[in-house]
Amino acid sequence: MIAKMKQAKKVLLIEDEAVLLELFADKFLREGFKVFQTTTAEEGMRLAKRNKPDLILLDIILPKMDGLTMLKILRKDPWGKNVPIIILSNVTDQQKVSQAMRLGVYDYTIKTDLILNDLVKQVKEVTDF
């Protein structure tokens, strides 16, 4: 009997800080995820629609289009309205946090409080990995 190979879960990372992007990508790759990554919301939209990731990790402060604007656009898309999104940001403004929550994010994590292993565990739970 041949065991069916488990399909790798897909994660899209949208983070404009290159060091963090590399750190996150490396960690998720080592954990067995298929990783797509970009530093802009515009490219993030293209990657999301093309690859339909199982989860998106999204920064708010991005060049040109910010993460909340991308989130609003994504939520209008038939596929994008249900994709789990975790915001990773250092923006602690309660108005931004509330706006993100109203747009249906799974979680809002402050990067300075982030423990990478806890984030991986959370992503595994959300994606049934």
Image (cartoon, rainbow, N blue to C red):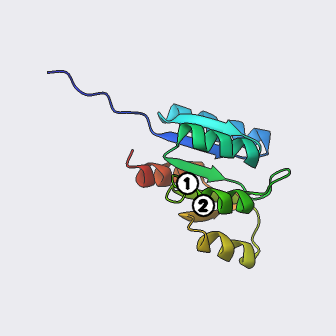
Q: Pinpoint residue 6: horizontal percent, then vertical percent.
A: 34, 33
Name the residue: 52% across, 32% down. 30
Question: Is the residue under label 1 in contact with that under label 2 (CB below 8 Å)?
Answer: yes
- Count neighbours of disc 2 (C-alpha within 10 A) and say few if under 14, some if 14 to 19, many if 20 or more: few
User: In the figure, is residue 124 to the left or right of 40?
Assistant: left
Q: How many marks?
A: 2
- Mark seen at residue 80: 1
Disc 2 from disc 1: Cα separation: 7 Å
Q: Is residue 110 visible?
A: no
In this view, the residue farthest toward the left is: 1
Amino acid type of disc 1? Gly
Name the residue: 61% across, 33% down. 26
Q: Is residue 20 above or below residue 98?
A: above
Name the residue: 67% across, 58% down. 73
- Mark seen at residue 41: none
Q: Pinpoint residue 126: horizontal percent, then vertical percent.
A: 44, 55
Locate the N terminus and report the quarter of the image it occupies. Answer: top left
Label 2: element kind: helix
Q: Nearer the viewer, residue 20 or 103?
A: 103
Q: Is residue 15 above or below residue 3?
A: below
Amino acid type of disc 2? Lys
Name the residue: 79% across, 45% down. 17
Mark 2 — residue?
76
Q: Nearer the viewer, residue 48 or 35?
A: 48
Locate the C terminus and report the quarter of the image it occupies. Answer: top left
Q: Is residue 10 visible?
A: yes
- Count neighbours of disc 1 (C-alpha within 10 A) and say few if under 14, some if 14 to 19, many if 20 or more: some
Task: Please name which of the two marks, 2 or 1, marks the residue nearer to the observer.
Answer: 2
